[in-house]
Image (tube, helix red, strand yellow):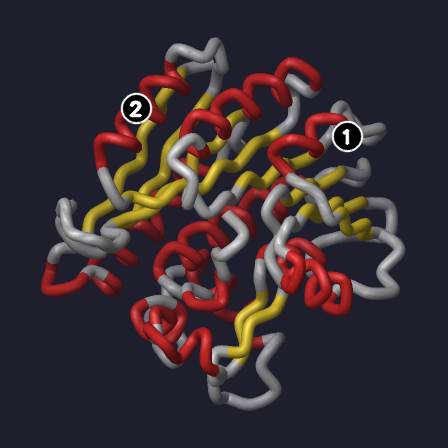
Amino acid sequence: MLSYRHSFHAGNFADVLKHLVLIKILEYLGKKDKPYCCIDTHAGPGDYALNEDYALKNKEFENGIAKLWQRNDLPDGVAAYVELIKKFNTTDELSRYPGSPLIIRQFLRNKDRLFLYELHSTEIELLSVAVSRDRCIKVFYEDGLKNAVGLLPPNEHRGLVLIDPSYEMKNDYQRVTETLVQMHKRFATGTYALWYPVVERSRNQQLERDIKSSGLKNVQLFELGIKTDTYEHGMTASGMIVVNPPWTLAADMQQVLPWLAQVLGIDGAGSYRIETLVGE
C-alpha cells in the first residue's frame, strides 16, 4: 500500500480525465458566494517534476498532458485545464505537473477550506512543503478513507470529497464503496468524486454493481479509455464516478470526452463512457 508513488504516472491520460472533472466541479462550487469545503483522501506530494527520474521512467505524461500542451484546437474545457497546468510551468516547456491539492488550491477563496490526507511517509513531507503557510489548508498524515469520514458534515454544508486511492490493495474496490456510503449518510448533499483505474474489467464491473446496490442516488460515470481492455498488465482506461454531480457536468464531459478519446487513444482504440449509474 505504501510503495505506490504517483510520480510514475503524473500527467498521464488518467490525470487528464480526473483533473478535468475536478476543475468542472470546483468551477460549479465557486459560482455561489457561500463557502465550501474540499477533502482529498489521497493527496500525494502535490507537485510533480516531469523531467526527473520517477516521471521519466515510463513517460506516461507523453500520452497525457504532453499531447495537449501545444495544440491550438482544444475544446473549451480542455483548453481551460491546459491553461491551468501552464501556470505551474515558468517557460513554454512542460516540466511540472500539479497534483489535485494544488489544482484545488487555485480555486479556493479565503472563506473556503481544504483538508488533505496522505499516508506515505515521504510524500506527506513533500505535500506539507507544497501547501505550507496556507491558512485554508490542513494536512493529515492519516488514512483518508478511514479518517476523513469524521470531518463530515462540514460546517459549510457545501463541498467536494475527492477519493483517489491507488487500488494496490484489491479490497480498495470494496472499501471505496463502503466509505462513500458512510460519508453520504453524514453529508448527503455533498459531491463525491471517485477515481478508478481499469486494469481488470471484472473488478470495475463489480464496483459499479456495488454502487448501484448501495442506496446512493444521483450517480454519474465518466470514463476515458486509450486501448482495448486486456488481461495483460497495465491500465487501459480510467474513470470518475460522481455522486451529486453538478447538473452541467454530463454536458461538459460530452464536449470533451469524444475528442480526448480520439486524440489520446492508441492506434485508434480510444473510447469513452458517459452514463447515469443511479438516477436521482
Q: Foreground residue, 141 or 224?
A: 141
Q: Residues within 10 Å of mark 2 (few under 14, many from 20)?
A: few
The residue shown at (48%, 32%) is 242
Q: Which disc is residue 206 wearing?
A: 2
Q: Is residue 35 left or right of residue 242?
A: right
Numbered disc 1: secondary structure: helix
The residue shown at (86%, 46%) is 111
Q: Is residue 43 left or right of residue 83?
A: right
Q: CA distance from mark 1 to mark 2?
A: 28 Å
Q: Is residue 109 left or right of residue 210?
A: right
**Residue topped by disc 1:** 151
The residue shown at (36%, 39%) is 222
Q: Residues within 10 Å of mark 1 (few under 14, many from 20)?
A: some
The residue shown at (71%, 57%) is 105
Q: Amino acid at mark 1?
A: Leu
Residue 115 at x, y percent in the picture: 75, 45
Q: Is residue 72 visible?
A: no
